[in-house]
Image (spheres, grey):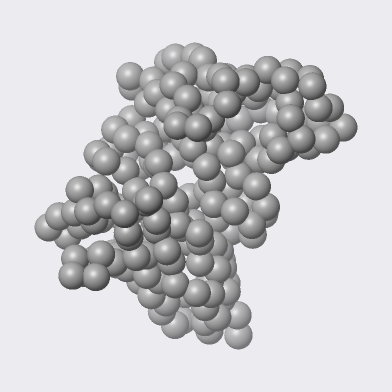
Amino acid sequence: QVQLVQSGAEVKKPGASVKVSCKASGYTLTSYYMHWVRQAPGQGLEWMGIINPNGGSTNYAQNFQGRVTMTRDTSTSTVYMELSSLRSEDTAVYYCARTRMYPVDYFDYWGQGTLVTVSS
Amino acid sequence: EIVLTQSPGTLSLSPGERATLSCRASQSVSSSYLAWYQQKPGQAPRLLIYGASSRATGIPDRFSGSGSGTDFTLTISRLEPEDFAVYYCQQYGSSPYTFGQGTKLDIK
């Protein structure tokens, strides 16, 4: 069965970087695009960007341009999202979610989420 | 960027009642590329509806979606206790993907 398993919770200081992983199983990583979506406490969902594991091309939302980097390791079926220059407003749960196509496709599977807390 | 506005913000109903949730887009959503997700506390969102009206695998038929262009609706015909959650609409017809701010469905 399809599973997206994310790394554990992180606590970071302002200005630091965080790298969250998302390990895919039950399907071929390179057959689906992987997105990152975040949710601040008590807030809605915000799309951060996408990586095509087949080749590694990316497309980042304007709000995160210059601060986010998405990468993949096909040998371990894992994708990564690194966010730099963290500030308190980046405190959120970060989700990976896949689509078969991009853009015209919906999220059919999601990871369990990774809480990133930014605090001095 | 397409802005999605959901209404109402909170909907208080009793089990067995009918729920109607609205999602309005700032511009036309191409080819009805609109999805609905359900989210319960501490959980990831779950896909309910895609293509505005197609139910995802395993979703009960009390959930239905309708609409096109800029106006979309999620209807839950008879609320079950497990349906009380937050519901989000999302457009995936153009980048960036965008979500509505959510409708919280709570027990009256």
| Residue A88 visible to an observer of this rendering | yes
In which image quadrant can residue A7 be found? bottom left
Residue B59 spot, x, y in % from top left: 53, 30
As drawn, B60 above or below A115: above
Count of numbered marks = 0
Q: Farthest residue toward the front?
A: A1
Of the 4 image quadrants, the one containing the C terminus of chain A is: bottom right
**What residue is at 20 percent from the left and 48 percent from the top?**
A31
As drawn, A16 above or below B78: below
**What residue is at 68 percent from the left and 17 percent from the top?**
B77
Residue A23 spot, x, y in % from top left: 34, 65
Q: Farthest residue toward the left?
A: A55
Apparent side of residue A113 relative to residue B84 in the rendered image (left or right)? left
**What residue is at 32 percent from the left and 59 percent from the top?**
A25
Apparent side of residue B93 relative to residue B72 in the rendered image (left or right)? left
Apparent side of residue B104 relative to residue B71 in the rendered image (left or right)? right
As drawn, A97 above or below B3: below
- Residue nearer the viewer, B36 or A2: A2
In which image quadrant can residue B7 be found? top right
| Residue B36 visible to an observer of this rendering | no
- Residue nearer the viewer, B37 or A57: B37
Residue A5 spot, x, y in % from top left: 42, 64
Residue A87 spot, x, y in % from top left: 52, 73
